[in-house]
Amino acid sequence: MLADYYGIEAPLEKLRLKYPTSLHGFTLVRLSTILNEMGLPGVPVQFDYDELDALPLPAILHYGAGHYVVLAWRSGNNVCVLNPSFGKQLLTFDALKREISGFALIIDEQEKRVLPGDGKAKTNKNWLPSWLSVKATSNVPYIYILMITTFVISMAVFIIPVVMSSSLNALYSQKQVEVSWWLYIISFIGIAGIDLLNGIFSANVVKRFSHISNTSGFRRLIHQPLRYFQKRNAGDIYSRFSHWCGALRGKIALDNTLRIDWLIALLAFGVMFWVNPLLSLVSLFSITLMGLISLWAAWKDRIYTQKIEMLSAEQNDFIMETVSGIHTIKSAGLHEHRQIAFAQQNKRMVQALRNYAVYNKIKSNLYQLTGNG
């Protein structure tokens, strides 16, 4: 049923012949293996009942003892599940929650492969580099609601200028100042409360995105061939994976900021072009120049970050290896050899950090010159 949704022909009778069931039914790992063979990488996840409405669809839900159903769609308080035993069923959320166990299998859209003969699959090329694309978070539930609420809250910075502007206008025109401080205080408290709720909402969105992405990344890691682990040391793998998980936690905020910046830039350019077209062209040139600097900075940031992570992983692995084998080093008299090796590694690490600091200074100066110009 899930394969049919993605245009893959997989009759249930053939699947049952190829993958015979046992008395205890299937496990999520077994289902994930079957989907992976069909080109649909499944990611097992655990969710709370109140997170059921945020689960990416379609999804396979653990239903009863060793039984599974496909959650096809949801609308209001009703859901539609595809049950292999009964076919299509329309249930309420409460009825579904009484049967499910809180485990599901979702499809990792980023790792979905194009199968031969799949005429419905299309490859889309993005004109932006992958490391600048916000496509990875475009399908995250409630991401655009988060963008709108953050944009509305950011508009609160105009409250103080509006109050001061109206006060100055009243001072010069009527020779008296009437400031609605009570309105200003109420607005300030209201915006602060909304900002707090938006922060909690953002944390929940980040939690769901990080949980699913980290689980998917760990699944891809442990499914790598043995030669992948033989070519890399444990410190390198650990450092890369931990930094990748940490970067995912900040990706929602970064992509949300990028979307808001694009929206603000378009609105500001439209207003400025309406006021003065020539001045708007000058601003457009300045924004374009700053955008080119940002592209160069993002590219260099990625290079330096990867280099520092690799050197840090090598140094961590070297230190752990030295500490774990300290008895052998002492008995064999390898103190000088290890000290020389550490000095060479540390020199490369310090040099990379120095180059990164110089680059950051150059980048900040370019931004300052462009902004002042």
Image (spheres, grey):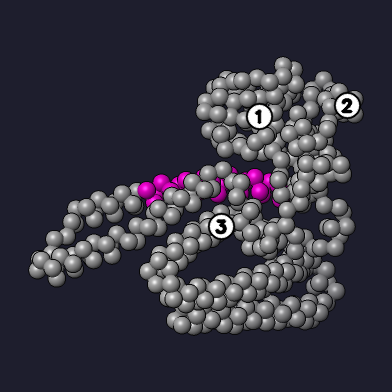
Q: Position of residue 262 (x, y in %)?
A: 51, 61
Q: Amino acid at mark 2?
A: Lys
Q: CA distance from mark 1 to mark 3?
A: 29 Å
Residue 9 against residue 259 in the figure, above or below: above
Q: Which numbered circle lies on residue 255?
A: 3
Label 2 neighbour load within 10 Å: few <14, some 14-19, many 20+: few
Which disc is residue 14 wearing? 2
Look at the numbered discs 2 and 3 and tell me whether their residues touch, using CB distance below 8 Å: no
Q: How many marks can you see? A: 3
Question: In the figure, 180 relative to 312: above or below?
Answer: above
Amino acid identity at mark 3: Asp
Q: Residue furthest right?
A: 18
- Residue 32 visible, this angle: no
Q: Is residue 137 magenta?
A: no
Extreme left residue here? 175
Residue count near mark 3 (Cα–Cα under 10 Å), binned few <14, some 14–19, many ≥20: many
Q: Is residue 206 magenta?
A: yes
Residue in view at x 28 percent, y 52 percent:
187
> Residues in magenta?
194-217
Q: Residues within 10 Å of mark 1 (few under 14, many from 20)?
A: many
For the residue pair 187 and 277, the one nearer the viewer reads as: 277
Label number found at residue 71: 1
Q: Residue at x 53, y 33 (%)?
A: 50
- Earlier residue among tags 2 and 1: 2
How far apart, in angstroms, are the residues tagged by discs 2 and 3? Answer: 43 Å
Residue 195 on image: x %, y %: 39, 51
Q: Secondary structure at mark 3?
A: helix
Label 2: which secondary element = helix
For residue 77, say whether it is visible. yes
